[in-house]
C-alpha cells in the first residue's frame, strides 16, 4: 500500500538561515559555521550563503549593505511566512565586552525575521528601516554560553547555536535577557546624514561600501522616493579618486550607455551603484573601498 505523499508545506523546515559575513571563502571558517548549524538546526533547514565578502572590519558599511540586501532577498522569495534567520558576523570586537544579540523584526518584511550577531552597530541600519516603515524590533542579549567558547570565533561557537535554536521556532527563554532597542550600540552616532552633498560623506552612506566581482561600486546612497533616499534620477554624481574625482551621469541600465562608458544606476538591492558598461568601474574611475561619493562637489577634475 502506498503511503500518502507529503505536501510541499509539510516538507518545509521551520525557517531559512542566511549567512552574512566578512570571512571570505578561504580557510575553515564558513565550513565550520555551517557544520555547527547543520548539527543543531531542524533536519532539512536551508542554509544560504548570502554573502561572505561583506565590508571587512566595518560594521557600519556592512550594516548599510545588509539593510539593502535583506529586504531585496526576501522580496524575491515566494509569498510564504516561514521565518528567516540572518546570522550576520562582521565582528572586529570579537572576544571583547561587546554583547551578542538576537533581534526579532516584524512588519512589512512579509515574515518574521531574526538577526543574530554582535552588538556593534551592524544591525542598526536594518532596525532603523524597520521602525521607519512602521515595523517592530525586539532585542535580546544572548546570555547562554557553550561549554567551549573560542575568544575569536563566536560565529561558530555562539551565534550558530542560537541561530539554530530560533530556526527551530523556539523562543529565547533562559538563553537571553530582553534589551531595549535604544540601548543597543549605535556606531551610526556622529555619521553625517545619508546623501550629504559636497565632497561626500566618507563616514556614512556617501562612499563606496562594496566593490563586486565586476568592479562595480555599491554606495550607501538611495534614490529619492526610497526610504531616506536623496539622489534624484537626473543627479550628476561625483566619485572621489586619485586625481581629484570624476563626474558620473545617470543611466537606467548597462545597455543604455556605450561600451566602456561610466554611469550610475539603482541596482537590484535599491542602492546607487557606480558602473561601467562591460568594464571595471573601479579601474576606470580609480575608486577604492571608502572613496567618497557626492551628489555635488565644489570641484570636479574632468
Image: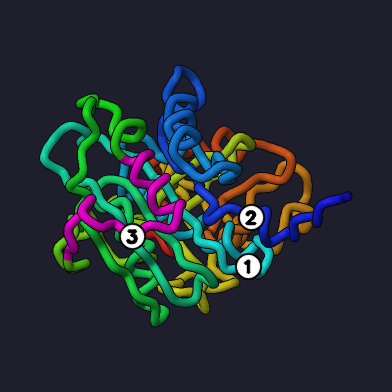
Q: Is residue 230 left or right of residue 200?
A: right
From the top left corner, tell me how far across and down residue 216 is, in percent. Answer: 58, 43
Measured Cα–Cα span from mark 1 to mark 2? 10 Å
From the top left corner, tell me how far across and down residue 31 is, in percent. Answer: 49, 25
| Residue displayed at 51% across by 40% down | 51
Q: Residue 131, relative to residue 282: is it above or below?
A: below
Labels 1 & 2 near each other (Cβ < 8 A): yes
| Residue displayed at 20% across by 38% down | 145
Along the viewing direction, whichever of 152 and 243 lies nearer the viewer:
152
Measured Cα–Cα span from mark 2 to mark 3? 19 Å
Name which of mark 1 and mark 2 comes first in the sequence: 2
Labels 2 & 3 near each other (Cβ < 8 A): no
Mark 3 lies on a secondary structure that is loop
Q: Is residue 2 magenta?
A: no
Measured Cα–Cα span from mark 3 to mark 1? 21 Å
Q: Which residues are magenta?
A: 159-179
Name which of mark 3 and mark 1 comes first in the sequence: 1
Residue matched to label 1: 80
Point out the frontmost of discs 1 and 2: 2
Along the viewing direction, whichever of 232 and 118 lies nearer the viewer:
118
Q: Residues within 10 Å of mark 2 (few under 14, many from 20)?
A: some
Mark 1 lies on a secondary structure that is loop
Q: Is residue 226 left or right of residue 181?
A: right
- Kindly indicate the quadrant of the structure image that contains residue 229: bottom left
Please tell me the numbered disc located at residue 171: 3
Amino acid at each position: 500500500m502506498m503511503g500518502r505523499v507529503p505536501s510541499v508545506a509539510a516538507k518545509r523546515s521551520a525557517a531559512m538561515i542566511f549567512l552574512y559575513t566578512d570571512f571570505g571563502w578561504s580557510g575553515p571558517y564558513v565550513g565550520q559555521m555551517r557544520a555547527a548549524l547543520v548539527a543543531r538546526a531542524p533536519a532539512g533547514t536551508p542554509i544560504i550563503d548570502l554573502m561572505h565578502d561583506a565590508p571587512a572590519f566595518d560594521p557600519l558599511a556592512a550594516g548599510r549593505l545588509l539593510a539593502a540586501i535583506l529586504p531585496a532577498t526576501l522580496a524575491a522569495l515566494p509569498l510564504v511566512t516561514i521565518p528567516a534567520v540572518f546570522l550576520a558576523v562582521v565582528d572586529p570586537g570579537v572576544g571583547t565586552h561587546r554583547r551578542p544579540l538576537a533581534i526579532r523584526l516584524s512588519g512589512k518584511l512579509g515574515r518574521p525575521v531574526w538577526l543574530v550577531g554582535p552588538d556593534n552597530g551592524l544591525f542598526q541600519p536594518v532596525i532603523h528601516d524597520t521602525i521607519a516603515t512602521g515595523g517592530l524590533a525586539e532585542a535580546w542579549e544572548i546570555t547562554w554560553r557553550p561549554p567551549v567558547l573560542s575568544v575569536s570565533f563566536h560565529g561558530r561557537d555562539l551565534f550558530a547555536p542560537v541561530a539554530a535554536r530560533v530556526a527551530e521556532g523556539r523562543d529565547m527563554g533562559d538563553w537571553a535577557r530582553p534589551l531595549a532597542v535604544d540601548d543597543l550600540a549605535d556606531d551610526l552616532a556622529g555619521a553625517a546624514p545619508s546623501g550629504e552633498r559636497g565632497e561626500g560623506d566618507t563616514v556614512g552612506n556617501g562612499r563606496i561600501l562594496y566593490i563586486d566581482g565586476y568592479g562595480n561600486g555599491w554606495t550607501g546612497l538611495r534614490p529619492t522616493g526610497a526610504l531616506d533616499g536623496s539622489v534624484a534620477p537626473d543627479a550628476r554624481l561625483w566619485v572621489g579618486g586619485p586625481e581629484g574625482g570624476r563626474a558620473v551621469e545617470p543611466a537606467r541600465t548597462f545597455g543604455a550607455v556605450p561600451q566602456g562608458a561610466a554611469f550610475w544606476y539603482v541596482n537590484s538591492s535599491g542602492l546607487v551603484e557606480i558602473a561601467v558598461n562591460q568594464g571595471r568601474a573601479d579601474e576606470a574611475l580609480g575608486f577604492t573601498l571608502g572613496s567618497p561619493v557626492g551628489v555635488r562637489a565644489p570641484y570636479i577634475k574632468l
